[in-house]
Amino acid sequence: MAVKKGPLNCLDTVKPVRDTLDVINGKWKLPIIISVSIGNDRFTDIQESIPGLTPKVLAKELKELEEHKLIKRTVVGDYPVKILYTAEPYADTLTPLIYAMKDWGVNHRNKVFSAE
Amino acid sequence: MAVKKGPLNCLDTVKPVRDTLDVINGKWKLPIIISVSIGNDRFTDIQESIPGLTPKVLAKELKELEEHKLIKRTVVGDYPVKILYTAEPYADTLTPLIYAMKDWGVNHRNKVFSAE
DNA sequence: CCGTATCCTGCACGATACTG
DNA sequence: CAGTATCGTGCAGGATACGG
């Protein structure tokens, strides 16, 4: 009766992690959030700040980030109109995550580099 | 001359984040690491601990995690042989990342829940 | 128990061109 | 400048079944 049977339960951790992945999954969302958070507020600036990012993909990702209330799209001025993208306060809650990722990436690159 | 031109540079952060994403990207890798780290060391236990995970996908992900030195596959015993999956020490370096993700996921679920 | 073998589907991502 | 329009591809992921 004291013997464990079946798999250990890891859902307490796995489920919230999957919730997070559902929001920030993919190659581009975090980079875009980083770029906008740092101050790039124009479509073209965001695109050019991230190598390999095409307008079609950027447009799609921005829409999804808007839906998740992470990024805000604002139209300013009359003629000509300007479109501004800014980070919502909610995006700031991702900062610990982003820095954890950055740190791990830096360390990982060092490890891979020194290993070969 | 003091006026900034072009996009602000965010590559110092974006590049390491992308390096990290290259390793842990996808729906299953982090959940699998969590499950193994918690003590699930048998193929079937890992599979059953993560709802929706099929054997084919698990086998593929385990191979990739092995290549990245995050998880170790060990054959023990003679007859019958046992296969054990264990977390490498290197997988522990992902702990801050995993907890950042877990925390954000918990908070996000609360936010979404209270919003509707 | 630990996988492999097929088969299948969608979509994430990419290249390129074009428009108000 | 801020996108949309097309077209194309690969692969992550899924369903199901089977094998040592």
Image (tube, coloured by chain):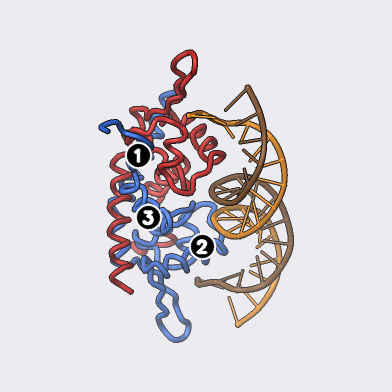
Chain colours: A red, B blue, C brown, D orange
Q: Is residue C17 left or right of residue A73?
A: right
Under mark 1, the amino acid is Trp
Give me the C-alpha separation between circle 3 and circle 2: 20 Å
Under mark 2, the amino acid is Leu
Give me the C-alpha separation between circle 1 and circle 3: 18 Å
Outermost top residue: A78
Quarter of the image holding residue A1? bottom left
Find numbered disc 1 in the image and state the secondary structure of the residue it sits on.
Answer: helix
State the residue at coordinates (44%, 68%): B42
Find numbered disc 2 in the image and state the secondary structure of the residue it sits on.
Answer: helix
Question: Is tag 3's residue or tag 2's residue first in the polypeptide sequence?
Answer: 3
Residue B85 visible to the viewer:
yes
Image coordinates of residue B48 in percent, x first then y, are 49, 58
Q: Are marks 1 and 2 in contact (CB under 8 Å)?
A: no
Q: Chain of mark 2?
A: B
Q: Are marks 1 and 3 in contact (CB under 8 Å)?
A: no
Report the residue marked by disc 3: B20
The disc at residue B104 is 1
In the displayed structure, D1 sits above or below A58; it is above
Q: Residues within 10 Å of mark 2 (few under 14, many from 20)?
A: some
Report the residue marked by disc 2: B58
Outermost left residue: B2
In the displayed structure, A54 sits above or below C1; it is above
Q: Residues within 10 Å of mark 3 (few under 14, many from 20)?
A: many
Foreground of the two, B49 or B97: B97
Image coordinates of residue B73 in percent, x first then y, are 41, 73
Find numbered disc 3 in the image and state the secondary structure of the residue it sits on.
Answer: helix
Number of labels in the image equals 3
State the residue at coordinates (38%, 40%): B105
Foreground of the two, A109 or A23: A109
